[in-house]
Image (tube, rainbow, N blue to C red):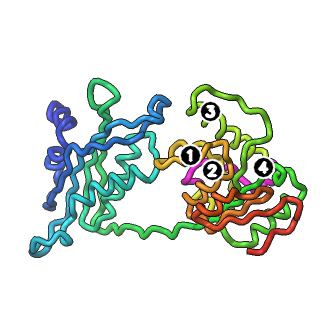
Amino acid sequence: MSSEIRLAFEHPSVRAEATAKDAPLDRISVRDHIVDVEIGAFQAERGVRQRICFNIVVEVRPLTGPIDDDVDRILSYDKVSEAIAYELSAERLNLLETVAERVAERILLEPQAMRVFVRVEKLDRGPGALGVEIVRERGLSDVPEAEEDTPHPQIVYLSNAAIASTHLSAWIDQLETQARPLIFCVGAAELDLPTAAHPLAQRRVDLLAIEQNAWVLAARDARCKVVDTRTELDWAMRNGQICIWAPSKIVLDAVDSPATRTDDAVALAAWFAATLEAEEMLLIGERPPLSLEEDMACPVRSHKVTNPTLPDA
């Protein structure tokens, strides 16, 4: 038992050696790799950056031939640091467990990688280091699955007049025929919103006001479902589900948060469209600001709510 306790606090390289199997494997390691990042499930951890430290050991299949001093023949240390950077930049995460899992999965996509030890620790949350450690393994016959093509949706922004229009269901009927994933965005209802003294608090108020209006739209047509996570959006786009974007989680968890104000719902929808690499963004009942038309990464079309027929592309 004392030996097991000792090993629990050893460096991952020691644990890898102690739990080695019969087949010999080489090991590469990255020690004390420290990154400043915004992470954490508590409200006090939002809007601030903290240091997290990675210690990673990767067991790799030995090469069957001379290395010839050729970096392309080995699993480079850069692949490990790139896996860390990639997963931390993909989205804001709450849990170290999630970070460790995703980094391990990405490392195991490398053909040589057989087993990986990942230890991740927060350095600024107390007098000591707080962390998690995981071990993940790939069998000899496992082959990394090819990533599926990412759908490119059509983003449709509906004004409050469009949400209330008697033509709403007819517009949805026509949009469904275009055989592209369909995601609706809305702004806040035309009500007096509470005001908060702190900008982060006001940001929450603005985003929640948009989400309230999303539920109003969902009540108008049963085909539309309110969705707030990227995972559910990806599933919906692949399975023909019409979505209404509830922005709070994706906006607050974004590594590159939108520069626009959260009470500018059209600009926020444009940021969302660019994030999803949408084919186009259609505005019903709103005219895009000139700057939006110039800056958008996808085409923007506008349409007056008084006409029940959608314009041609």
- Which residue corresponds to mark 2? 268
Does 218 lie within the magenta span?
yes
Q: Amino acid at mark 4?
A: Leu
Identified at 17% across, 69% down, the residue is: 71
User: Callout 3: 10 Å neighbours few (<14), some, many (20+)?
Assistant: some
Q: Is residue 163 above or below residue 143?
A: above
Quadrant in the rendering for residue 169: bottom right
**Chain-order first, disc 2 or disc 4:** 4
Mark in the foreground, 1 or 4: 1
**Chain-order first, disc 4 or disc 3:** 3
- Label 2 secondary element: helix
- Which residue corresponds to mark 3? 202
Q: Where the N terminus falls, by quadrant?
A: top left
Mark in the foreground, 2 or 4: 2
- Label 1 secondary element: helix
**Chain-order first, disc 1 or disc 4:** 4
User: Callout 4: 10 Å neighbours few (<14), some, many (20+)?
Assistant: many
- Label 4 secondary element: helix
- Determine the CA span between mark 1 and mark 4: 20 Å
- Compared across the picture, whether 63 is left or right of 231 comes to left
- Which residue corresponds to mark 4? 217
Residue 203 percent coordinates (x, y): 60, 36
Mark in the foreground, 4 or 3: 3
Q: Nearer the viewer, residue 31 or 295?
A: 295
In the picture as drawn, the residue positioned furthest to the top comes out as 127
In the picture as drawn, the residue positioned furthest to the front comes out as 290
